[in-house]
C-alpha cells in the first residue's frame, strides 16, 4: 500500500544518516563497499564495523519498540531450491555491486545528491534493468515476480500509520536531525577536535539512522520494492511510496551538498575539513573510468534487484530477522564480491 507518511519520515532518516556521515566523517555511505570490507579481513576497518553494528541494531530496536513497522519478509530458506535461488541472487548482487562500484545507497542516494555523472549513469542502468526484469522476466520464467495486494484494492491505496507508529517515527527523525545538525553542526564555528572515538560513535549512529530509515520508508521490504517497479505492466500492483525517497532523501542531501560543498575550496581558497575527521575520503573516479565491467556490474545488480527487491542494506537488516536466509545470501554475496 502507498505509505506517504512512513516513507517520508524514513527518507529523512536515510538523509540524516548518509549526509551526516559525509559532512562529519568525510565519507560516502556506500553500503556495498562497507559490507565487502566487513566480510574481508584484509579491508576491515573500525569505522565500517561501527556502521555495520548500527545497521544491525536497527531491526532489533524496531522489533522491541514497534514491531508493526517491521516488513513481512517472504519465507526463509525452506528447501534446496530456495537455498540455491537465494545463494544465486546474493552472488549476482555481490558481483554486480563490486564491479558497478556501488548500489542504491552509494550511487542513487549519495551519488545523485553529489551530482556525480558516474552515479547518474549507474543508477539509470540498474534502475531501468530492475524495472524491466520485474515486469518482463515472468514471461520468460513463468513465475510471477510482482505480487498483487492481498485485500483486493490497488497497491496505490493510501495506508496511514497508527498514532503510536507516527510518534515513534517522528521522534526518531527529530532526534537524528537534532544530533546531526544541532549537536554536531557542520557550520558551527566551534568544532570538536577530530578523534577516532568520535568518528566511531558517529559512524554507529549513522548506521542506526540509516537502518531505521530503510525499515520506516519501506526500502527494507522486498515486496514493497518490487511493487514500486510495477508501473510498466500492472498499474494495480504499483506502489508509488519509494518515489518519496527521492524527494525527502535525495532532495535534502542535494541541498546540503550545495550548501556545505564538502571537499570543495571556499571563496578564500581553503578546503574545510569534515567536522570529525582530518580529511575527506570522497570518490575520485569519473565518467572516463567507466568500462565494460562497470556497465555489466550495474546491469547485473539491476537484474538481482528486480528479481528479489533486495539490495545490500536491506539484506543486512533481513539477515538479523531471518538468520538462515542471511547466511545463504551473504555467502553468495561474498562469493560474488571475490570475482
Image (cartoon, helix red, strand yellow):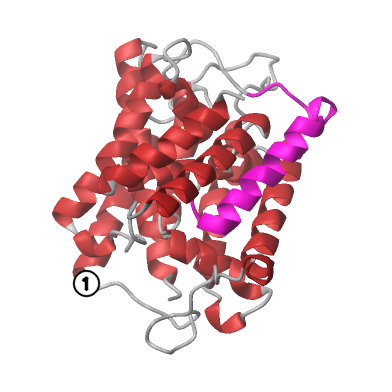
* Image label count: 1
Could you tell me which residue is drawn at 19 percent across and 53 percent down? 63
Q: Which residue is mark 1?
A: 163
Residue 305 percent across, percent down from the top left: 57, 52
Could you tell me which residue is drawn at 33 percent across and 20 percent down? 200
- Picture quadrant where residue 265 is located: top right
The answer to whether residue 261 shows anywhere in this view is yes
| Outermost residue toward the right in this view | 288
Query: 244 and 324: which one is in front?
Result: 324
Residue 39 percent across, percent down from the top left: 42, 23
- Picture quadrant where residue 184 is located: top left
Task: Name the image quarter holding the N terminus.
Answer: bottom left
Residue 228 percent across, percent down from the top left: 55, 67
| Outermost residue toward the left in this view | 64
Could you tell me which residue is drawn at 31 percent across and 34 percent down? 54
Q: Is residue 9 left or right of residue 270?
A: left
Residue 209 percent across, percent down from the top left: 35, 42
Q: Is residue 296 found inside the magenta-colored segment of the image?
A: yes
SS under mark 1:
helix
Q: Is residue 44 found inside the magenta-colored segment of the image?
A: no
Q: 209 above or below 229?
A: above
In the rendered structure, which segment of residues is drawn in magenta? 283-310
Amino acid at each position: 500500500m502507498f505509505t506517504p507518511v512512513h516513507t517520508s519520515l524514513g527518507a529523512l532518516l536515510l538523509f540524516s544518516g548518509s549526509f551526516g556521515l559525509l559532512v562529519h566523517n568525510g565519507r560516502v555511505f556506500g553500503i556495498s563497499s562497507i559490507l565487502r570490507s566487513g566480510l574481508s579481513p584484509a579491508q576491515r576497518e573500525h569505522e565500517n564495523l561501527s556502521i555495520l553494528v548500527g545497521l544491525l541494531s536497527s531491526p532489533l530496536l524496531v522489533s522491541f519498540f514497534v514491531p508493526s513497522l517491521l516488513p513481512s519478509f517472504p519465507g526463509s530458506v525452506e528447501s534446496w531450491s530456495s537455498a540455491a535461488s537465494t545463494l544465486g541472487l546474493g552472488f549476482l548482487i555481490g558481483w554486480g555491486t563490486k564491479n558497478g562500484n556501488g548500489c542504491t545507497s552509494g550511487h542513487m542516494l549519495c551519488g545523485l545528491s553529489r551530482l556525480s555523472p558516474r552515479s547518474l549513469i549507474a543508477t539509470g542502468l540498474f534502475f531501468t534493468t530492475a524495472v524491466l526484469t520485474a515486469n518482463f522476466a515472468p514471461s520468460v520464467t513463468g513465475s510471477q515476480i510482482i505480487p498483487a495486494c492481498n485485500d483486493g484494492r490497488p497497491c496505490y491505496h493510501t495506508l496511514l500509520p497508527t498514532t503510536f507508529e507516527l510518534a515513534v517515527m517522528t521522534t526518531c527523525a527529530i532526534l537524528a536531525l537534532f544530533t546531526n545538525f544541532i549537536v554536531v553542526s557542520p557550520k558551527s564555528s566551534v568544532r570538536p577536535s577530530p578523534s577516532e572515538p568520535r568518528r566511531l560513535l558517529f559512524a554507529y549512529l549513522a548506521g542506526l539512522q540509516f537502518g531505521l530509515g530503510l525499515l520506516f520508508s519501506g526500502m527494507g521490504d522486498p515486496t514493497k520494492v518490487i511493487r514500486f517497479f510495477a508501473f510498466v505492466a500492472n498499474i494495480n500492483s504499483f506502489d508509488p511510496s519509494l518515489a518519496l525517497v527521492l524527494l525527502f532523501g535525495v532532495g535534502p542531501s542535494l541541498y546540503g551538498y550545495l550548501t556545505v560543498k564538502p571537499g570543495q575550496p571556499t571563496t578564500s581558497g581553503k578546503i574545510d575539513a569534515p567536522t570529525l575527521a582530518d580529511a575527506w575520503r570522497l570518490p575520485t573516479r569519473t565518467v572516463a573510468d567507466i568500462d565494460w565491467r562497470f556497465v555489466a556490474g550495474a546491469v547485473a545488480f539491476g537484474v538481482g534487484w528486480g528479481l528479489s527487491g533486495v539490495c545490500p542494506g536491506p539484506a543486512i537488516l533481513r539477515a538479523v530477522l531471518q538468520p538462515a536466509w542471511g547466511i545463504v545470501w551473504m555467502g553468495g554475496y561474498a562469493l560474488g564480491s571475490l570475482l
